[in-house]
Image (tube, rainbow, N blue to C red):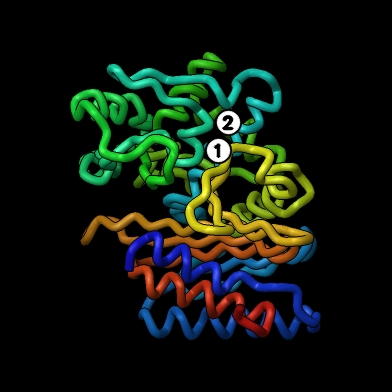
């Protein structure tokens, strides 16, 4: 299944406001839905769920809840929020640019995967950078772009590519004079009351796919920024965004859909190196209310990812639009 088709399917699963049920019953349904999904795909996993910034529940199924998991592409939201906070503080602007060879890329376009970068050179290079966590390889990504010369994607249109977030890290470091990791921990993680670190396996991919964190902490992070109390989640159309399909946008490291009274934000992640590292992740915040993060040991296809979204949405809301 293509990424675009998956995004369209996700729209169908985005819940509307429905009759409330008791939270314990919903939590039981979430746990049962996660159990069924893991059993079908023969995976171990761990899930955290939180409602309205209050009680948080962790479901452990062969993975410990107190152990940091590979966030994979859920890391992009950390980079995007970090950049956004620097813009809010006046240390960056969405019009700031990074030059690679003859090409000039705007921060606002990099954030939304609409800078025209392509094809994604990281998809081959990441295999050689696995298990080298000492420093992120963003400068090496810039080198790959230079060697490639020219870009296949069309500027101004959505084209998902890890290279965008590598260049964002370079912009962050240039603007602050500090390393990406410490800046983004301070700007994006600490305000949410969470901690994270470069993965010992994928830390070389840090700005686009190499953070590690417990699912509980990522749920807190996601709910803090995208749950509606901060402008990031309350007014996503005020920041950089690009239309992916009618009613669906990509903004600060997340897909989102705008509702009448609240918004939905989601992203999947996967690191698939057969026989070396095979993991997946998923995070969603529905209508500023429920936030869920799941991590699992294995690589699944888009249909399976969609099935996880469906199962959790039905468990929480009882319906599927």
Q: Position of residue 297 (x, y in %)?
A: 38, 66
Q: Residues within 10 Å of mark 2 (few under 14, many from 20)?
A: many
Instruction: Give the Cα separation between the discs numbered 2 and 1.
Output: 5 Å
Q: Seen in the image, is 221 located left or right of residue 80? A: right
Residue appearing at x 19%, y 29% in the figure? 148
Nearest the camera: 147 or 11? 11
Helix, strand, or loop for circle 1? helix
Which residue is outermost to the front? 246
Q: Using the image as rendered, state which of residue 283 and residue 178 is in the foreground.
A: 283
Quadrant of the drawing holding the N terminus: bottom left
The reply to whether residue 77 is visible in this rendering is: no
Find residue 194 and report its image quarter.
top right
The spot of residue 99 in percent (x, y) is: 37, 18
Quarter location, residue 259: bottom right
Count how many numbered circles sit on residues in the image. Answer: 2
- 10 Å neighbourhood of mark 1: few (<14), some, or many (≥20)? many
Q: Which residue is painted at 29% across and 17% down in the image?
A: 102
Q: At which x and y percent is residue 127?
A: 23, 45
Marks 2 & 1, CB-CB < 8 Å contact: yes
In this view, 261 is above or below 97:
below
* SS label for mark 2: helix
Residue plotted at (67% across, 84% down): 318
Q: Decide: is 153 above or below 229.
A: above
User: Eyeballing the image, is 302 above or below 277?
Assistant: below
The answer to whether residue 143 shows anywhere in this view is yes
Q: Which residue is mark 2?
A: 83
Residue drawn at x 38%, y 32% is: 136
Identify the image quadrant of the C terminus.
bottom right
Residue ID for mark 1: 80
């Amino acid at each position: 299944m293509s990424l675009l088709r998956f995004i369209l399917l996700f729209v169908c699963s985005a819940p509307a406001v429905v009759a409330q049920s008791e939270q314990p019953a919903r939590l039981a349904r979430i746990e049962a839905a996660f159990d069924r999904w893991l059993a079908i795909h023969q995976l171990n996993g761990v899930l955290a769920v939180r409602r309205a910034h209050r009680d948080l529940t962790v479901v452990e199924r062969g993975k410990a809840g107190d152990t940091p998991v590979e966030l994979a592409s859920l890391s992009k939201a950390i980079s995007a929020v970090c950049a956004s906070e620097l813009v809010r503080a006046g240390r960056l602007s969405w019009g700031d640019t990074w030059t690679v060879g003859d090409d000039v890329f705007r921060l606002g376009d990099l954030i939304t995967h609409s800078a025209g970068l392509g094809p994604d050179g990281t998809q081959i290079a990441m295999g050689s950078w696995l298990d080298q966590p000492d420093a992120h390889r963003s400068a090496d990504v810039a080198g790959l772009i230079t060697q490639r010369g020219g870009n296949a994607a069309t500027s101004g249109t959505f084209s998902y590519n890890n290279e965008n977030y590598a260049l964002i890290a370079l912009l962050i470091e240039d603007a602050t004079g500090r390393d990406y990791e410490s800046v983004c921990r301070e700007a994006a993680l600490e305000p949410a009351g969470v901690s994270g670190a470069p993965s010992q396996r994928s830390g070389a991919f840090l700005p686009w796919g190499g953070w590690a964190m417990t699912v509980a902490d990522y749920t807190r992070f996601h709910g803090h920024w995208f749950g509606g109390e901060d402008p990031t989640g309350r007014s996503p159309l005020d920041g950089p965004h690009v239309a992916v399909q009618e009613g669906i946008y990509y903004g600060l490291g997340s897909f989102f859909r705008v509702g009448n009274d609240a918004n939905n934000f989601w992203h999947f992640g996967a690191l698939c190196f057969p026989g070396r590292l095979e993991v997946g992740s998923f995070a969603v915040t529905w209508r500023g209310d429920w936030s869920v993060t799941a991590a699992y040991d294995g690589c699944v296809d888009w249909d399976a990812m969609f099935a996880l979204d469906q199962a959790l949405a039905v468990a929480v809301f009882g319906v599927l639009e």
